[in-house]
Amino acid sequence: MSTHRITLAGTILALATLAACSSSGPLAGADPAAGCAGLAGTVVPATAIGLPSGAARIETASFVPAAPLSVLERGPTPAARIVPAVPDHCRLLGRIAPLDPAAPDIRFQLNLPVRWNGRSVQYGGGGFNGVLISGLALVPGAPYDRPAPLAQGYATVGTDSGHETKPGQPPQAFALNDEALLNFAHASYKKVRDVSVALMARAYGRGPQKLYFVGSSEGGREGLTMAQRYPADFDGILSRVPVIHWTALQHVGLRDGLALTDGGWMDPPRVRRVHEAVLAACDGADGLADGIVSDPVGCRRRFDVGTLACGAQPTPDCLTPRQVAAVRTLGSPLAMPVPLANGAGEYPGRGPSGEGLPAAGPTGGWMAWWTGSSAPAMPPQPSNGIAWFYGAGAIQYFYARDPKLDLRTYRAQDHAARIREVSALMDSTNPDLSAFHARGGRLIVLENMADYAQSPYAGIGYVDSVIATLGRERVDAFLRLYTAPGVDHVGSGAPANADLFGALVDWVERGEAPRALTLVEQTTAPPFAVTRARPLCRWPEWPRHTGGDPSLASSFACVR
């Protein structure tokens, strides 16, 4: 791993030096701060954007001096506490005008390093977006001691996807505007890509040689969307825990939330009891009892929630019939009664493993994503669990388009036309990636196997569909699917971080396919000591302990 980092860093430095010498734009002059300021007011005409659009305009251009790495005391996720070092760069804040006067602008931030390596990285968003992505963070799932792309010489860009969530406003409310929904679905990321390429050409005197897209969760969906809809736009894409079967996911969030009503809801002690029972049944199957279920697929066969059912006298250590039924609902697939885009009509169940991971932050487990701190309410509240709050709100604003809809009365069949329309916009399930492959694109997908925000088996199933469409040999030439056991949606619970971006760059630019990657769990304070590690296994393999120090990746082997 260290040799790989040194080689990659040396390559990036050489590219940055070459780019700095050969560029002729305003950022390459003797006074880059003045060159940056001169970019304020720059207009990118609609003709430079590959979709129907208004023009883009830079509102502010600020020269930002280099700053060292810092760590926040708190953050919504472990990685969010890391504020990476930045080099001298020009920060451009701009907007892309809509066609519909009632639709919001698309806001974006473009960061242009003074020493540019001739490449760019576009960051995806999260949730329902509505927040401007700065492009300054670590790549999703990156080790904490890796420099962020901007510090490596990449130009970086992010967007709010074409709407801004206002305080007190449901995050799904923007979907009542058709253009705002289209932008959230896919158009904003394409538009921002084209605008950023034009601005890089203006700032440096030439456009980027290679373009990358990185995203997690909703951003992971965006990455797959780019490969499917705009296969010529990005050379490499990293898609982590993508919310891929989007329409079915929102409906399964509604189903799983309703399962917690009328006595199905479980308090934290019962959630913990299920978690302990899963570990008792499955933790040691990998040769090591360490709190990580390394083989969650096998655990689906080993664990039966019915063993926790109460007898005649319920106690805090048992589950009522309604609670047992709720857990079985969560683990069961949802067959959609309405045909969805690309023939994807079923959403896979979730679990087991990771049920009792702490919810503070939130990080993961049932208490963050499913059960929340209180049973589902009408209207949905964030305290009810994120999956219910997100899914129920999506049903109201995206599909029924009725913010006052009584969710208990919703039937998908009554909204079939609208479901098919939104599915065609939002679901990143097209298995035909032949155009992306033909232009030399490379794609890495990572699923965390203790994820309750979405089912990791959805991404696994999607890759299976790509293989069925294109054939294994062809897919192996451009796509890798990895899985991280015991890790929740945002990267907690087990070793979760790996240098997948570095591996992606090597694959794109050197033709070196990823191999021998390592997952690490680190402290969130410098020097970010590694507390335990595992090999990052390519699906369908998983790490089995072979003996030796359980904190070392070398003590495990990937097995089927």
Image: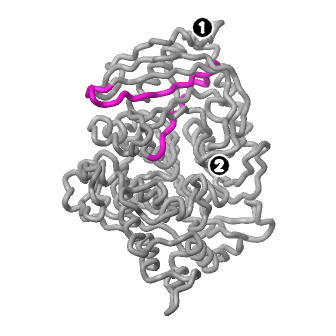
Which residue is rendered at x = 52% and y = 20% of the image? Answer: 92
Q: Position of residue 290 (x, y in %)?
A: 71, 70
Q: Which residue is mark 1?
A: 34
How far apart in space, not on screen, are marks 2 and 1 (Cα)?
37 Å
Residue furthest out toward the bottom: 312
> What amino acid does circle 1 point to?
Ala
> What amino acid does circle 2 point to?
Pro
Is 433 positioned to the left or the right of 350 in the image?
Answer: left
Mark 2 secondary-structure assignment: loop
Residue 119 in magenta stretch: yes
Along the line of sight, which residue is nearer the eye, 94 or 487? 94
Which residue is rendered at x = 53% and y = 15% of the image? Answer: 203
Q: Position of residue 446 (x, y in %)?
A: 54, 53
Q: Which residue is mark 2?
A: 78
Which residue is rendered at x = 70% and y = 54% of the image? Answer: 521
Callout in the foreground (2, 1): 2
Is the residue under label 1 in contact with that under label 2 (CB below 8 Å)?
no
Q: Earlier in the sequence, mark 2 or mark 1?
A: 1
Residue numbers of the magenta segment: 98-127
Along the line of sight, which residue is nearer the eye, 521 or 231? 521
